[in-house]
Image (cartoon, rainbow, N blue to C red):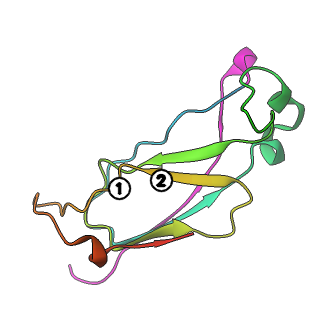
Amino acid sequence: VGGTDTLDATLVPEFMGGLGIMPLDVQPTTSNIENIEIEARDGSSFYGDAMSIGYDSPGGPDSFDITLDAKDMTDIQRIGSHNSDGDLRIENLTTLTSSGTARKTEDITVVM
């Protein structure tokens, strides 16, 4: 009912038991949430030595991009990272509204 809505979320690398840390994308579905604020956390702050098993990214075992796949997120006016100690990657950012119409890209602000 009018107003500006904000989604504030903390994202961390996925831990897959004996497989270690896996680089899985987060793929939320949202509509009518205008502001998206993401805190990307470095996996080593949560998993410690578990970072050394399993997936080893080119930047080292504790170097991960947290990937937000925004393909199913509509009506976004502002999206960005705050207080992050990990790397945040935003993919497939759409300009669609929840009704399916496209907006001009200048109507979206990306803050990193």
- Which quarter of the rendered picture does the N terminus lie within? bottom left
> 36 or 111, which is in the foreground?
111
Q: Residue at x 60, y 33 (%)?
A: 23
Task: Kindly give the residue lying farthest to the front in the view shown.
Answer: 58
Q: Could you tell me the amino acid type at mark 1?
A: Leu
Residue 15 at x, y percent in the picture: 68, 30
Please name the amino acid that badge 2 sits on.
Answer: Ile
| Image-quadrant location for residue 60 | top right
**Residue at the image point whose x is 51% and y is 68% from the top:** 80
Which span of residues is magenta-colored?
1-20
Contact, mark 1 vs mark 2 (Cβ under 8 Å): yes
What whole-number distance in Å separates the C-alpha atoms at marks 1 and 2? 7 Å
Q: Is residue 83 magenta?
A: no
Give the position of the C terminus as an image quadrant: bottom right
> Seen in the image, is 87 located left or right of residue 25?
right
Find the residue positioned furthest to the bottom: 3
- What residue does disc 1 label? 93
Task: Name the secondary structure under disc 2.
Answer: strand
Q: Position of residue 2 (x, y in %)?
A: 22, 82
Give how far across and how far down residue 34 sits, in percent: 33, 72
Q: Let me know if residue 2 is in the magenta part.
A: yes
* Numbered tag placed on residue 106 in the rendering: none
- SS under mark 1: loop
Label 2, on which residue? 90
**Residue at point 62% right, 70% down?**
82
